[in-house]
Image (cartoon, rainbow, N blue to C red):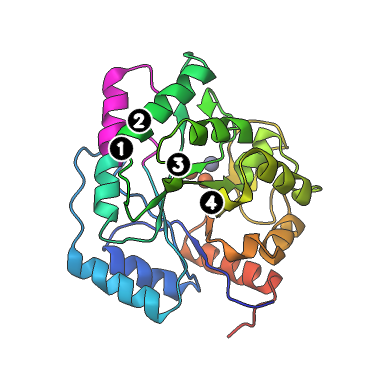
Amino acid sequence: MSGRLALGCHLSTTGGYAEMGRRALGIGASTFAFFTRNPRGGNAKPLDERDVAELRQLMADNDFGKLVAHAPYTMNLCSAKLETIDFARRAMAGDLERMESLPGNYYNFHPGSHVKQGTDRGIELICEGLNEVLVPGQGTIVLLETMAGKGSEVGQTFEELARIIDGTTHDELLGVCLDTCHVSDAGYDIVSDLEGVLDEFDRVIGLDRLRALHLNDSKNPRGSHKDRHEKIGQGTLGVDCFASIVRHPLLRTLPMVLETPNELDGYAQEIALLRGLAGEDRD
Ligand code: FE
Ligand code: FE
Ligand code: ZN
């Protein structure tokens, strides 16, 4: 097997962008995720250009894969409240504008919760939001995350994600981030039939849309719609499932982000474990 995995975890933005890069290096990571703004905060600070330039240099020097920024969880493009929708659109537009300082990376978001308005209306509102916010020619690909189907979450089936992509004008700016805990909780059997699930993804969405992975084990059985992440190998997915993912010729080329319940040292161990499973040499 060739090429090092673009593997990392979710990091706190405390200390800035270059500091996240250094922290990633310190745990053997070669990509990372971060929140683009404080989930409760109003306006986000503009990016410090020197800090971002330092991160870009660090990424180039150390062969990092694409980063997978994460929109705040509080952002809901298909809320029943107008002001919530308005906030979501403004937040996303602002985040994408700031991401232009770090072009060529990904911005991942939860499609939304339709809160009793129904899936059809939810999808309609998400498409409306994306049509308002996406700017042709922007340097960031926006990723829809596969969801567990907790509450009224939209995006728990590949069909729902395909409908969002179909309803968006500038769909060339859209991709999908597959979260292993979420797809299993949604009912897809990646433990005993990873190939079958990928075939289905290809048939419904198209595998060219698959741009990133969230690697999380799950505390709950397949189809539970719970969304409780577990450490790699300690949940219902198990270590063999992650071995087949990191060895998969297509999947191993994608940025992979851990969102497991860990501190930095726990992430370092999981990264070493996964690199070992992928057959990478330890240094
Ligand atoms: Fe997420
Ligand atoms: Fe996730
Ligand atoms: Zn989750």
Q: SS at mark 3?
A: helix
**Closer-to-camera residue (256/138):** 138
**Magenta region: which residues?**
72-92
The disc, 1 or 3, on the residue closer to the chain's N-terminal end is 1
| x then y, percent, for residue 169 | 41, 35
Vertical comparison of 190 with 18: above or below: above
Q: Compute the Cα span from label 4 to label 3.
A: 33 Å
Q: Compute the Cα span from label 4 to label 2.
A: 32 Å
Q: Is residue 280 visible?
A: yes
* Badge number at residue 171: 3
Q: Is residue 236 visible?
A: no
Please state which amino acid type lies under the numbered disc 3. Answer: Asp
Please state which amino acid type lies under the numbered disc 1. Answer: Val
* Badge number at residue 133: 1
- Given this view, does label 1 or label 3 mark the residue nearer the observer? 3
Within 10 Å of disc 1 (Cα), the crowding (few <14, some 14-19, many 20+) is: some
**Is the CB of the residue bearing disc 4 within 8 angstroms of ligand 3?**
no
Q: Compute the Cα span from label 1 to label 3.
A: 12 Å
Which residue is the site of mark 4? 261
* Badge number at residue 129: 2
